Image: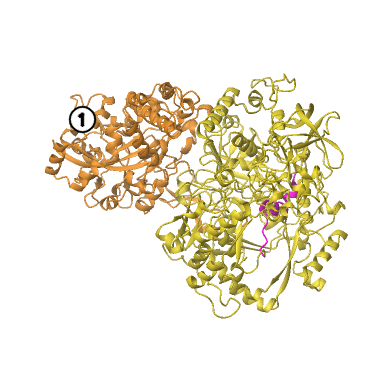
Chain colours: A yellow, B orange
Amino acid sequence: MVILKPSAANSNDYTSGRFMRISDLQGTDTVANAEWKPVVYDRNQAKVVVPNGTIGQRWEAGQQWNLTLKDADGQAIDPQLNITAEQQVTIDFPTFDADGNGVLKRHVPVQTVTFADGSQRLVTTVYELMLAQYGIDQGNHDQLAASGYDDANSRYTPAWQETVTGVKASLVVQIAREFAQNALDTGGKTMVIMGAGINHWFNSDMTYRSIINNLMLCGCEGVSGGGWAHYVGQEKLRPQEGWGAIAFANDWQAGGARQQNGTSFFYFASDQWKYDELDNEAQKSPVSASKHAYEHAADYNQLAIRLGWLPSYPQFDRSSLAFAKEYQSTDINEISQHVVDELKSGQLHFAAENPDANQNQPKGLFIWRSNLFTSSGKGQEYFMKHLLGAENGLLAKSNSRCQPEEMVWNDDTVTGKLDLVIDMDFRMVATPMYSDVVLPAATWYEKADLSSTDMHPFIHPFNAAINPMWESKSDWQQFKTLAKTFSTMAKKYYPEPQYDLKTQPLGHDSKGEISQPLGEIRDWKKGEIDAIPGQTMPALSLIKRDYTQVYDKYIALGPNARGKEGGLGFSYDVTTEYDELKDILGVYDRGVNAGCPKLDQDKRVVDAILHISSTSNGHVAKKAWANAETVTGRSLSDISAGRTEEQMSFKSITVQPAEAIPTPIFTSAKHDGDRYSPFTVNIERLVPFRTLTGRQQFYLDHEIFQEYGESLANYKPTLPPQVMAPGDTEIAPADNELTLRYMTPHGKWNIHTMYYDNLEMLTLFRGGPNVWLSPVDADKAGIKDNDWLEIYNRNGVVTARAVVSHRMPAGAMYMYHAQDMEIQEPLSTITGNRGGSHNAPTQIHVKPTQMVGGYGQLSYGFNYYGPIGNQRDLYVNVRKLKKVNWNED
Amino acid sequence: MKIKAQIGMVLNLDKCIGCHTCSVTCKNTWTNRPGAEYMWFNNVETKPGVGYPKRWEDEDHYKGGWELNSKGKLQLRAGNKVNKIALGKIFYQPDMPELDDYYEPWTYDYQTLFGPEKAHQPVARATSQITGLKMDLKTGPNWDDDLAGSPEYFKADPNMEKIETDIKANFEQAFMMYLPRLCEHCLNAPCVASCPSGAMYKRDEDGIVLVDQERCRGWRFCMTGCPYKKVYFNWKTHKAEKCTFCYPRIEEGEPTVCAETCVGRIRYIGAMLYDADRVEEAAETPEEDQLYQAQLDLFLDPNDPDIIEQALADGISEEMLEAAQNSPIYRMAVEEKIAFPLHPEYRTMPMVWYIPPLSPVMNYFEGRDSIKDPEMIFPGIDEMRIPVDYLASLLTGGNVPAIKGALYKLAMMRLYMRAKTGGKDFDAAKLQRVGLTENTATSLYRLLAIAKYEDRF
């Protein structure tokens, strides 16, 4: 149920606010986690109740947290979708169009509820809100509703969408019916497989939610063979616990690693925030105002950092090793108090508030197998200029007209922030070319390793066919060598243990996800609430680091791995498995790692990962399900029961790759050879979703979602066309220049960075950089197939050859991913420099709604959450390259 | 009757995704060496398109394959070798593709990337693998991939000139399909017939066509003679080379590299028995659109006791006989008639066959009404984006009903399986109408859709 609030657009109208909770009706002292328990109206008891399964029960001791429809007293409930209407009110929905924002008036039935504080509030249900938004007439000749599918004047009808997309209304209706009929006929086996393309748009989450809403409405989610399937960009490792323990050294020091969402990091580090020209106001709802509103997206990121929503490293404008020394204490409580005091008094700042300050710049960058500077880094020329200080084609000027309020603006341009770049790769592509040190990496055919994703049922090994060529080494051996040298050096530079103060955002699947109630922002910096680490700001921890021991710890599985481990909020004991590993791998007999299983060789690492992970060791899976049963009170152990005796090892999966064992840290309840099917454990077995309500949500009520008009899935157009911004470098016009939408999709051979630029793959197409455009556009600009083109916008320039094809729609240009600039890339006539890669004309725009934290499913998790690096809402100018100058001098 | 055994291949174009894995693994295995740089024993073409070498299907230009003379007898289109030698034409081959019809193979000057500091970032430029000079790239072996350069290459597909359907090259109606190609290991191989040195030969035991490198004198008649342009000239050794059907693997009971590595599991390999005495007669069938049927009629039923007896008498091994009895090729080509030879009008009796692609029409006939009315597939197939007469031009010498029969069958199989999976009734009479039963539809589904390794090879 949702509370209505006055519309900011029309004084007599309402708009939807936040979910109603039990705390609205009863004192927070009488019900545990009352502010985290959204309510439904139960038809059986004819009253408002809390169903089991919400995030409130999740973090309530002694509760059996599951989705059986019962209330706190164990009474079966029958939640009402519609509301028993006492009256109808006019509700304002925010609308977004290319030519401006607007208000959509609809009628919605409401009830009046008396709250605990005595106030009378209007409430309705999410279902009623959705019917109202889509203009569905509920049989009372509603003048504000649509007259039918063919009512083009009523928003969200098939006829209306035709005016936006050009797709015929009749076709939309037909496909919708088939989609639903198939779900009806098959019990929900209608599936949508979403590729990476959607993720690359600024408002892609609106598209995502719309598609998933369709699937939810047709009962397809959590059905084997139906629902939402993804193909790119959300991969998770299967043997997760063992991998996580070793990769982030949690076996020696839990939570010692700093992990950040890449988009925010590079948005600030490469200074793209200073060039951001996006009009955020156009993205905001006219019907819902927020007193925490900002104009600049970077300000929302600052808010997210200081309220503990998103991580940000480096964390403060002071070395993280300095605090214990400065405060002369190793007591975290004492240090925390000092930190809070200094933050509030303005003596200490988050580093991200001033990314250009010398002490806040990243100085060393270690790139492990990513072609960061061209293929992966969106906004290539910003990386080239600000991080590397290299030749670049950046045509934009920093945008002092739009300065963040919460950041230090510096008119000076800082270039070349990085002092040292180390790259590990086996190809001489752009990133190694711009690195100070290149560590030659072994390929898949030269090493032992593991391969798995949640999209493929099997866990595969890599086995070396040949030894690594020349000086190259496997990744494990590379880092081992580095660890050894580092530890040796530490004996001179850091002979004593150091105390490292670490900030950590409020984490998903931890109690941190119920830190900031009601989805209302309380900013300690504005004095709205106390600064409390781990609650209203990032958590603080003090980590003792002995750098002289890094190598000894690296080559052994540390004692922290002996005990509890888990994932997705489940926890189970692997002491037995740890002790078994001592026999399997052998142990060291002296020093800091005495008694610890050996991890000196690649295969041993694989064995350790497989042995302590629930996807690869049936005993661990059994324990994991047992814990899930305790947490949820549901019978679940049968899911992996048939596989209890399975214990994968490097040797066993070399003989025969094995199918991952079902485990509660993934959401598939499938067993006995059934394929992995996400969310079946939630739908079939009633294990709650990790959301505020414990259920799939059509509605998101956080203040920022209301501010941006995205509480319900909504239509938002792509960002407005822009090639150059005012104040950018002026480019002399050329004849026949075209402006086209610029997209960098995955090609059929080149997903992201790798392996397109070998001789065979390049021979099997056109041998160098190319862009696709339609014959219609090509004709307009006098372009012929295979002509050299120059493509630019404020972010940079790329030179490439034209591929003219009627497979392309008019108005759009493709430059397939991962066309690097070290192959066949001539100079640009505009910059006089080497043209860039496919990423040269791109930049990052960050979306504030994707930064919310400390709030249910909207909480930070590594490789899970944060603003996306979208780069599709971009336009370029295209012209023929007058002179092809290779300039090899 | 003289029974011979032949290894053949079927490629299910309905499932080809154009990834070129077959091409790459083939190249790495066979032609990754000096003199062979431009050779792709296996390549994948986007259709409509010009292919590799360009417009290889234009036999008016390349003069490949066979034609019938005024007496209705087979003769090489390029002229027979005796005449050529007699007229002194042996020393030049005017009808062969030239380097630009293939492409000038290149590599990159990668060492530049390791050079000293320069004014601008260095780039590895294309250099010719033939001359060593810098190159301006203008063509390659897959230049029109995915309809690239379609204003130039789409209509230049020789098949487009032969069909009546007007195919529009616009975005709304865009269509394409992939055609992976290798040597056809023809029953009536014009390359073998062309060779003045007796170097080209067809292996007795399995029909694989090979070049004896000792005997080849580099006359290159084979290159002109092959209408598929699948014999190449090694410019280092000056000898002919071609797809070997990975005979060292076949001899060990393993599939070819292209088939083994196919990501989409589209390739099937199997043995066929045929009557060698009737090949010439079949190839002399006057009507081009009857050549497909004439070739079908050559194949012998490997389960017929008389055929088995005669085959053993003709020296066919028991192993080969068993392979013929379990052959997925026989099942698809002869029993189900869903696979077709590539350009039978060349009269070569090719042995790499193709199942025509169906997918682009599925939206139309799997629509809301189609469950109620499977009849919708019949008009649906007539309105495919890949027109049936285009497919007929590729695969049946213009025999449209044969193509339609296969597509109806494939479509009905899908409808049947869809109903079965969804627990719905399906009128068996509808299966009968396209020559299927519930059992054959189910086993065909297993063969085509599940395509297990053991079933494909």
**Residue nearest the observer in this picture, B66 or A697:** A697
Residue B378 sits above or below residue B187 on the image: above
Give the quadrant of residue B287: top left
Image quarter where the N terminus of chain A lies is: top right
Q: Residue A189: x percent and y percent? A: 52, 36
Q: Hey, which residue is sitting farthest bottom in the picture? A: A590
Q: Which residues are magenta?
A: A256-278
Q: Chain of mark 1?
A: B
Query: Element type at marker 1?
Result: helix
Neighbour class for label 1 at 10 Å: few (<14), some, many (≥20)? many
The mark tally for this picture is: 1
In magenta stretch: residue A265: yes
Residue drawn at 45 percent across, 46 percent down: A763
Q: Amino acid at mark 1?
A: Ala
**Residue nearest the observer in this picture, B172 or B125:** B172
Give the quadrant of residue A120: top right
Q: Residue B248: x percent and y percent? A: 27, 53
What residue is shown with label 1? B282
Q: Residue B451: x percent and y percent? A: 37, 42
Q: Hey, which residue is sitting farthest left in the picture? A: B313
Asked if residue A806 shows in the view, the reply is: no
**Residue nearest the observer in this picture, B189 or A601:** A601
Image quarter where the C terminus of chain A lies is: bottom right
**Residue nearest the observer in this picture, B455 or B12:** B455
In magenta stretch: residue A479: no
Q: Residue B10: x percent and y percent? A: 32, 39
